[in-house]
């Protein structure tokens, strides 16, 4: 009766439902063979037209009531949406031309997204034919896409050549091959180029860029460089110091870029001290090194300052250079063994390991920091350091590395942080859908998170200072492995299965009978995790890239924690060889640092030449960068000879020795000028497990802080600071100025600088304010504020 009523009153509507709810037969005048594949053709059209992009119907909420899976990650969902949703109005097999998915993108009907293709386009023909054939779903028998081949993959184009045609072809599991140049999607990494619908790349500006070519679920990067002609270019053929230079130089030569000159002795010692120790060399150290380097260059009358004599006598020039490099190598070795090295690099590790007070408490951050610093001081290999972090449990006071799991408090946070820190994999996108730019799926994400789901903590006490902040913890905690625990994959609604990232099978401890919670099991889940992480090729590559970034200011892969096929390294072979060498030397941090710093690449000047002044990614010259918050703060105190003071810490502690991050409570910033200074200059609060939180940007507030803050004025006018001792030393005005320049800039003043400063002191009735003015000018000089 109910069925009869429905069909009787709503006959046409009932017929439409019958069509939608049953398999769709081919029309009587059609050939039985299906030429258009939903999986391989229709889905490609939806991507090419941008329909399933994040800013359109691929958005989490869709657009205008129409939602597709992001970038076509779920063809079955999209098929049902196109054929079943909206009572089938989107695709009309009785009159294909009246289908909404043809009317709207061709703007025959109003479409917020504008025209996506024309009625005479290939896209239109594919969709029309698929609809006309009854919208077949070939999910069970369509050949799978196996390979996307793009050419060229790497190309350098010199002016006047301003465009290049990309070609794409796809290979399917049945052996069929098709040209995908027109239907592939082209996405640019920056505004240097424009790519036409058919894959023609057109130069907008000079420089290097990556074009991402995508077809269905596969994607491939194409690296392109549009370079000025530079007619008359001559490669200067600088001598290579080590294998790093052998990998850097060929690309520079191909790009018609010459390396900048070798940096001076004063530039090198200042750079080395800042990079390794976070402090400036003393005046005595800088003067001695520079004088020794000049002496090393004086071979049988060959003087460093006379470059023409080097050209006339190559043998003497070679001997001079060798002695200079040997002197620099000895300095590097000396600095690597100084205690300040462990201080400064413990600061770097504390930043990314989230060693901050809000989640750990004051005692916890101090113990955690001490363990990190001690690990560096005793030359602990990086792989062992990471294994100890990942396998730690017990009291966060008695076993400090257990604070890694206290800082990252839940399974998904631990999964994301561990992948990003130690494998260079950013997984966050895969939390809601398959990663649009990488190979990680939602299943990968939640199975990986499940590895951490049984890591639990017990709060023994919580002496919270802020009763309203439920996220604050102050007291000892116990990290342990619970008997039960798990993560649900929201896409399937089923429990995730513990699986190391990207591995096909479960972890050694994924089965209940083999978990550590089982007394009969000898499998330690967290130790197995640490062993697996440190054996992965991505571990060595990501750690080598992190160290390179610390020394060079930019990663070979950049951003440094975003390793994916669509973000290729600037120098792939160099990165691979650094990683292999790092692993071969048992992950010795100092060995890797020593290798990089002894290269000609590291020791190049920041002064660009005519060919490399626009280059920022090929390491043809040093990249000037602002001193970090701690470096700047400590350098100011070091130059003025005053002790720093921090709340609740002993006087004289350097900023680089502070165990925690920036205070996160406003009350902690009261009467805390030093803490405010560090926060203003980019010291991170350590709420994220990445380098991205530390800021090196310059702001107007920083300018006022440097030129007019009461704190800087207080340090300058301190009656017992270095300026007072200089004036009391009995030195001449010229001697005082010379000493101050060596202290602040690691070099002697130029004749002009010396004349101006001594004139200022000579006419002053009271030399103290005049010397304060000179010191103030040096502390605000770009040469002081920048690491070059």
Image (tube, rainbow, N blue to C red):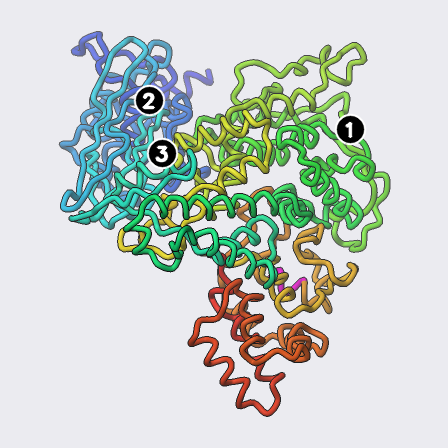
Label 2: which residue? 16
Out of 600 and 643, give the one closest to the viewer. 600
Which sits earlier in the primary sequence, circle 2 or circle 3?
2
| Residue at x 49% of width, y 58% of height | 266
Say if 441 sits above or below 337 in the image.
Answer: above
Q: Position of residue 277 (x, y in %)?
A: 61, 51
Q: Earlier in the sequence, mark 1 or mark 3?
A: 3
Q: Main secondary structure of the magenta part?
A: helix
Residue depicted at 29% across the width and 26% down the height: 44
Instruction: Report, in whole angstroms, how far the alpha carbon at label 2 lies from the one at label 3.
Output: 27 Å
Report the magenta residues as a range: 675-679
Residue 509 - label: none
Residue picked out by circle 3: 52
Q: Which residue is mark 1?
A: 480
Residue 474 vs 154, above or below: the answer is below
Using the image, determine if residue 618 lies above or below residue 503: below
């Amino acid at each position: 009766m109910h069925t009869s009523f429905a069909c009787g009153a709503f006959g046409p509507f009932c017929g439409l439902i019958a069509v939608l709810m049953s398999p769709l037969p081919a029309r009587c005048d059609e050939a039985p063979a299906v030429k258009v594949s939903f999986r391989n053709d229709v889905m490609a059209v939806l991507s090419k037209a941008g329909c399933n992009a994040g800013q359109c119907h691929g958005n989490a909420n869709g657009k205008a009531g129409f939602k597709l899976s992001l970038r076509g990650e779920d063809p079955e969902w999209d098929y049902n949406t196109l054929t079943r949703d909206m009572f089938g109005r989107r695709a009309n097999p009785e009159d294909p031309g009246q289908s909404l998915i043809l009317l709207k993108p061709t703007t025959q009907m109003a479409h917020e997204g504008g025209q996506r293709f024309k009625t005479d386009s290939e896209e239109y023909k594919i969709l029309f034919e698929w609809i006309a054939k009854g919208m077949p779903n070939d999910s069970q028998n369509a050949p799978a896409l196996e390979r996307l081949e793009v050419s060229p993959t790497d190309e350098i184009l010199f002016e006047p050549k301003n465009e290049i045609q990309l070609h794409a072809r796809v290979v399917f599991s049945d052996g069929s091959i098709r040209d995908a140049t027109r239907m592939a999607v082209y996405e640019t990494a920056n505004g240097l180029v424009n790519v036409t619908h058919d894959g023609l790349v057109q130069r907008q500006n000079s420089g290097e860029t990556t074009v991402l070519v995508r077809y269905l679920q596969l994607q491939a990067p194409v690296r392109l460089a549009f370079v000025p002609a530079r007619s008359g270019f001559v490669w200067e053929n600088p001598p290579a110091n080590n294998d790093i230079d052998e990998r850097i130089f060929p690309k520079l030569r191909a790009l018609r870029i010459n390396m900048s000159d070798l940096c001076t002795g004063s530039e090198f010692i200042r750079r080395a001290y800042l990079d390794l120790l976070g402090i400036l060399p003393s005046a005595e150290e800088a003067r001695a090194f520079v004088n020794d380097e000049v002496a090393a260059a004086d071979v049988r009358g060959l003087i460093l300052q006379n470059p023409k004599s080097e050209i006339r006598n190559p043998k003497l020039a070679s001997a001079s250079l060798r002695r200079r490099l040997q002197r620099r190598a000895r300095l590097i070795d000396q600095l690597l063994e100084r205690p300040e090295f462990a201080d400064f690099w413990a600061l770097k590790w504390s930043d990314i390991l989230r060693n901050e007070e809000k989640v750990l408490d004051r005692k916890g951050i101090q113990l955690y920091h001490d363990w990190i610093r001690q690990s560096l001081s005793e030359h602990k290999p990086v792989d062992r350091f990471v294994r100890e972090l990942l396998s730690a449990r017990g009291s966060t006071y008695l076993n400090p590395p257990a604070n890694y799991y206290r800082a990252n408090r839940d399974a998904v946070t631990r999964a994301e942080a561990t992948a990003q820190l130690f494998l260079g994999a950013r997984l966050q996108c895969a939390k809601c859908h398959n990663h649009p730019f990488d190979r990680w799926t939602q299943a990968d994400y939640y199975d990986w998170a499940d590895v951490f789901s049984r890591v639990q903590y017990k709060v023994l006490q919580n002496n919270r200072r802020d009763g309203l902040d439920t996220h604050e913890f102050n007291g000892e905690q116990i990290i342990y492995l619970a008997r039960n625990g798990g993560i649900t994959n929201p896409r399937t609604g089923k429990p995730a299965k513990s699986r190391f990232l990207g591995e096909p099978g479960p972890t050694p401890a994924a089965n209940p009978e083999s978990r550590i919670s089982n007394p009969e099991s000898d499998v330690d889940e967290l130790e197995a995790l640490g062993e697996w992480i440190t054996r992965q090729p991505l571990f060595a590559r990501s750690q080598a890239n992190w160290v390179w970034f610390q020394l060079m200011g930019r990663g070979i892969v950049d951003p440094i924690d975003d390793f994916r096929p669509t973000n290729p390294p600037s120098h792939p072979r160099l990165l691979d060889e650094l990683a292999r060498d790092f692993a071969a030397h048992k992950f010795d941090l100092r060995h890797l640092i020593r290798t990089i710093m002894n290269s000609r690449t590291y020791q190049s000047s920041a002064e660009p030449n005519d060919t490399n002044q626009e280059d920022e990614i090929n390491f043809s010259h040093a990249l000037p960068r602002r001193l970090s918050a701690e470096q700047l703060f400590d350098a100011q105190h070091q130059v003025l000879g005053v002790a720093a003071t921090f709340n609740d810490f002993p006087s004289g502690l350097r900023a680089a020795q502070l165990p925690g991050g920036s205070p996160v409570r406003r009350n902690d910033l009261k009467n805390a000028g030093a803490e405010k200074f560090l926060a203003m200059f980019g010291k991170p609060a350590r709420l994220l497990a990445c380098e991205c939180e530390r800021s090196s940007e310059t702001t107007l507030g920083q300018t006022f802080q440097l030129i007019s803050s009461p704190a800087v004025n207080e340090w300058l006018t301190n009656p017992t600071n270095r300026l007072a001792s200089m004036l009391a030393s009995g030195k001449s005005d010229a001697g005082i100025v010379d000493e101050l320049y060596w202290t602040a800039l690691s070099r002697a003043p130029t004749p002009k600088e010396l004349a101006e400063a001594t004139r200022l002191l000579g006419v002053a009735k009271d030399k103290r304010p005049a010397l304060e003015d000179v010191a103030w000018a040096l502390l605000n000089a770009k040469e002081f504020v920048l690491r070059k």
